[in-house]
Image (cartoon, helix red, strand yellow):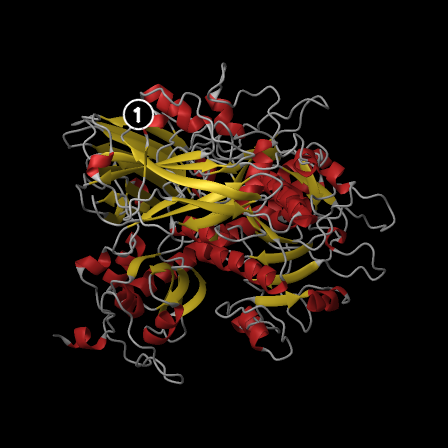
Amino acid sequence: MDRDERRRPRIPEGRLPPRIPEGRRPPEIPEKRKPSRIPDAKALRRCGPGIRRLLKISDEEIIQKKSKDDERVKKRFERIQKKKKEVRREAEEASWDEIRDLLRPGTARRKRLVQRHRIFGPIKITPEKEIKIRAIVDFAGNEDDLRNIFGIQVHSRIQNIFTVVATKDQLADLADQAATRKIRLPRIFFPYLADAVPIAEIDQIHATGTLGNGVITGIVDGDLHVAHHAFRDPNDPNHPTRVRFLWVQDPNLLPGGVQPPGQNPEQFFNDPANPNSPDFTGLDYGRIYDEDAINTALGLADPYGTGANQIAKVLDAGDPEHGTHVAGIAAGSGHLNNWAAATVNVGSAPLSQIVYVSKRFSVPNVLSGVYEDDIIDALNFVLLVADAEGRAVAINNSYGTNVGPHDGRTEFDQVRNAMLDSFLGRAIVYAAGNDNDNQGFRRGTIAAGADEVLTADPVRVAGNDVIIEVWYEGPDLDFEVTCDGASTGVIGAPNDFNGVLNLAGGINYNVTVDRVENPGSIKNLRVYVVDVAHNFTVRLENNGASEVRYWAWIGVQGWWASFTAGAIQQEMTLGDTACARSILSVGSCDKPAVAGNPEPIANYSGRGPTFDGRIKPEIAAVGSDVFSADSRTTAGYIDMSGTSMSSPLVTGAIALLLEDDPDLNQDAIKALLIQTADQTDLDLDPAAAGYDEVEHRAYGFGRLRMEAPFQHDPPLVDVDVWVRTADDDYGFEPYTGGCFCHAPEVTIIAPDGQATLHLHWNQEHTIQVRIHNLGETAATKTMVRVKYTRPWAAPDEWVPCKAPDNNVIEQEVDIPALAYVDLTFDQKWVPKEDELPAGGDGWGNHYCLLIELKHEDDPLQYDDATAAGQNPWIKNIKGTNNVALRNLSIL
């Protein structure tokens, strides 16, 4: 055993080592650094490609690459500052309409865009030349193990997902552990850049006195202009802030890089002066301001700066701030300079309390994107406040990326699902993205022995970085990247590529192509070209024996470049960040040309479905030409467009629902909004004549309307019990989605305690299921029964599941109104091969487990209980929400 093998900590599989006693710390790194250890092949497979590369190259090379990236960003920043001065000079002689056009997000962002290097951006080099790497970790251990055993800095933990900062050696040690599932670098997100309130009927809810009182509206975005009248209390003569907490993740610094006065959230929590603070342990960066600190700053001549009692974030005086505008849509009060004047451009929840996170850009004070781990920390921060104060909360985020599988399975998706599942009074809303009118998506097939060429034109962000994200099913693909005659050569599987394309005239482009490992059959090639200003091509070769199906996106967002041929619109143009199962994803509509007409979907609004076939976005709302708070004034308003504007409208609307019923869960919120959405002139029902799949991808289940959810129009039935058929099932009857054969909330537990879909005859299995009630009264004495069968059998031939004592497995439960219960059956199921009727040849070991619900006020009725075969089976299963099916095998 070598020295490195002896020194590194190792967690035996199946258990964790004892914690280091209080007061002891991991050994400090000596002044003379040892060469970093490279983990073995098995450990490296637990690492994403960026982490793998960092662990394989020397510290000296990392420091050199980081320095080069810093210099590149500095030059880009200088060009941006020059361009902004030119824009302002143009504005001095322009009309108001011309000024507004110059400052529209779509125009301004291309003038301001800066992106850190995908690998070397999330790295910090300390003055002692120590390399610190930001990472997202999926780890089955606990937080103390990461802190005390490995010495890793942990910011947030959401179930098994951690945001961390660590050295190379610490990550190498962690990769060795069986408890580690994945370590990867954070992705980078960018914003999705008249009144919408009356169209969505929100003003009618305001008229009832429901204005968001007692509910927290959480916003994670750019800078917030706290002095704007939209975010201050209009009823108090001193007009104090309505912002409960403001966390500035990236404050302005004093000369020499010194932190400004104040505390980070962790320090705030540990300060005895704040005994009621939420537990912000781990959130040890930035500056936090509670409402008292904000009110103190508002009393100064200038609330912003790095002086005592100031908020350490100086707003850009030239461009209207995206975050301030978003916050105004969700929670702005619409007040002008004259507090007594009639309000204008009122947000959805104008009396809600605001918890705001001003996230840190990857390059300070420049539109340079925000790292994924910062977003996780920000969401966690808002939820910590809501939990500590016992308040319901609706959170909005309007930033996203196309980098990812679009199937809701990333660690970021898992985090957001975990934040919502099994919680009451929480909602998270995400913008669908603005890529549908770009040339940023294409798909196709590559026959065996053939190739396909993808050509990207980076003209819209020339001189910046472009990613082509390719996901595919089938044999491994070989690839070649070419640009203006220079080529990587053909790179065969399983090899990656990292090198330089040398063009004529001394132009050099750094190119990285990674193969990203993923669960299941889907595979990934991620092509990354730095500072590219020329068209480049990616040629995909299929040298396998069968065809390859592929899906390709331009990243980070579709407007960064264009596919010169083969681009597709109207499908799968939503961002990867809008694909998580539990979140509510929102598309954007234009305002109707004629008042009273239904609002049409905006051409830019991202379309679904997700890669795994779910309907996203679920709902659409007005997002074009929406007037909201202008950060360059204390009481002015400006219009912006995008799903960045439609999603906060919905977020604030949900805050109103939570004021009315703070115990709603995310499923009930989705169901209320979806089932009462406006479908005027739309054909969204797949079972109806005239069904329009393109409309379904764009609008989801319809347009936001708020009067019906509050007035229960159509009236909610007393009891409406249901069990989820698929991830995109929210209680509709009939279910209108696609797949209906793997009910996600039905779980079978094997004798070893693990969830499984591969059962064994004559063994005991535990069955768990979540049962919902969309009714307005409790569903007492709901009978839940379990059956199983071969596919396509008629319902009256399904066989009851039985316990070891041969009793039928069934159980009564009580389900509260607009809620759910998680049921674990008291009896264990023992499948027996002789229970099923003869027949079913050709299905092998394939069987179907079915959950049936019965209540006297919601009886179970099949469309045709005696009919067998595929079409009757589909009709019976999808025709009632009182039944769900889970495919499984029994050996």
| 787 with respect to 265 (left or right) | left
Residue identifier under label 1:
792
Identify which residue is drawn at 68% across, 45% down.
Answer: 656
Residue 498 x %, y %? 25, 50
Farthest top residue in view: 689
Farthest right residue in view: 340
Quadrant location, the C terminus: top left
| 140 with respect to 769 (left or right) | left
- Residue 106 shows up from this direction: no
Q: Height in image: 407 above or below 130?
A: above
Find residue 36 and report its image quarter.
bottom left
Identify which residue is drawn at 25% across, 56% down.
Answer: 752
Q: Pick whichever, 276 or 446, lies toward us.
A: 276
Identify which residue is drawn at 81% across, 44% down.
Answer: 343
Residue 698 x %, y %? 51, 28
Identify which residue is drawn at 84% across, 43% down.
Answer: 342
Residue 779 x %, y %? 56, 42
Q: Pick whichever, 711 or 681, lies toward us.
A: 711
Looking at numbered disc 1 in the image, what kind of residue is underneath it? Answer: Trp
Farthest left residue in view: 1
Q: Pick whichever, 634 or 393, lies toward us.
A: 393
| 216 with respect to 40 (left or right) | right
Q: How many marks?
A: 1
Q: Height in image: 656 above or below 595?
A: below
| Crowd around label 1: few <14 · some 14–19 · many ≥20 (10 Å) | some
Quadrant location, the N terminus: bottom left
Find residue 329 and report its image quarter.
top right
